[in-house]
Amino acid sequence: MTQFSSYDFSGKRALVRVDFNVPLDKETLAITDDTRIRAAVPTIRHILDNGGSVVLMSHLGRPKEGYEKRFSLENIADHIATLTQAEVLFAGDCIGEKAFEMSAVLNPGQILLLENVRFYPEETAGDKDFAASLSRHGDVYVNDAFGTAHRAHASTTVVAQFFSNDKMFGKLIEAEIKSVDKVLNSSEKPVTAIVGGAKVSSKITIIEQLLDKVDNLIVGGGMAYTFVKANGGEVGGSLVEENYLDVARKIMEAARSKGVNLLIPTDTVIADAFDNDANTNEVAIDEIPSGWIGLDIGQESIQACEAVIGQSRLILWNGPMGVFEMKRFQAGTVAVAKAIASATDNGAFSLIGGGDSVAAINKFKLADRVSHVSTGGGAMLEYLEGKELPGIAAILN
């Protein structure tokens, strides 16, 4: 595999697949979170600073039938220019003749932004002819879109076959792979995984994988109540996946047999409605009254999490501890985020992944105090689960 840092980009057009699927304000179409664009800037600047030009391709949203203004990458072109400090040209298509004319005469130091590749159904279908057309825009292919690496789409995977020796990962994907590998394969101990979110069903595979890698596994969020009920606890009207009670019991037994310290919350903040203005109380997590729902972990659980995180050397966080979007139920998630930041300050390596965890670490302005914030929620989960990601395999093979 060609190494990005040692490749000679001088006079070359680099076709770079980025993940600029950023949230836009519905009214103004202004970017509300530019994390994914900022994450790709080091790759783009490296190519430009080494004498190359850049042709960017990305998707945005899920357009149904061709062009839709709210999903046009033209909405973000000016912001890309601001962040990269480079001239950004925009092609109103990704495989139209005008687009090919523009990329053919691109000068070193310039960026050409192609229109949303998902305006063509051939993109998600992984169409080879469509990929071949996209490949005409570059002399070298750089995949820096970790967020879509688990999709076998034309621009993320299939296009790589048209660049036999001139294909590579950008700086972002290199960092993503290195970070996950460090958590899964490092000899440093103790390793702590914090897995939260709503459902056990969406996290079973990752939990099973992690039980062979970690010393501590902290369970939080809505999924905790399935574990509590599986242990015979009363959880009131809290979110429970009845079909996964046996799975939860098997996970607890597997943790015991493998010597993994499994932390399930012991207390919880409950409410009489799913509302920031609801009546609240703090009770033992296995004694939630009927008609009440658990929406965050309690103070005893927070202290237990802080103690474990504080003595960890490697930390993976995927999923919040409660409904952190509501101020009354964010204490657990805030405490975990701050504990991870403090542990990182003290030399631990921390990897934050999954949309809600990333949103939380950004919301509480702690992203610059952790080791790595993953840009690919689904892709990172699948990589942690040990699955082969098509976008990664296309570069390696």
Image (cartoon, helix red, strand yellow):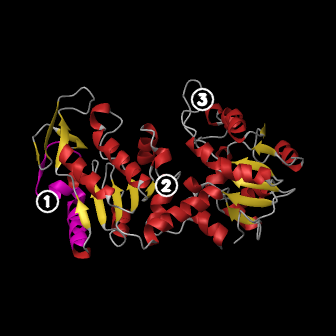
Residue range of the region highlighted in magenta in the rendering = 227-256
According to the picture, the residue beneath numbered tag 1 turns out to be 231
Choose top left, top right, bottom left or bottom right for residue 360. Answer: top left
What residue sits 31% from the left and 68% below the top? 215
In the image, residue 171 above or below residue 251 = above
- The tag earlier along the polypeptide, 2 or 3, is 3
Give the SS element for disc 2: loop
Residue 139's image quarter? bottom right
**From mark 2 to mark 1, how far is it between C-alphas?**
35 Å
Mark 3 belongs to which amino acid?
Ala
Q: Position of residue 195 (x, y in %)?
A: 34, 56
Which quadrant would the N terminus be assigned to in this image?
A: bottom right
| Residue located at (10% from left, 40% from top) | 290
Callout 2–callout 3 Cβ contact below 8 Å? no
State the predominant SS element of the stretch in magenta: helix
Question: Is residue 12 toward the left or the right of residue 212 in the image?
Answer: right
Residue 152 in sight in this render: no
Q: Secondary structure at mark 3?
A: loop
Q: Within 10 angstroms of label 1, few (less than 14), some, or many (20 or more) residues?
A: some
Q: Earlier in the sequence, mark 3 or mark 1?
A: 3
- From the image, state whether disc 2 or disc 1 is nearer to you: 2
Question: Is 308 located above or below residue 54 in the figure?
Answer: below
Check residue 386 for magenta coloring.
Answer: no
**What is the three-letter code of the residue carrying label 1?**
Asn
- Return the residue found at the far top: 27
User: Is residue 395 at all visible to an observer of this figure?
Assistant: yes
Q: Label 2: which residue?
A: 371
Q: Which label number is shown at residue 30?
A: 3
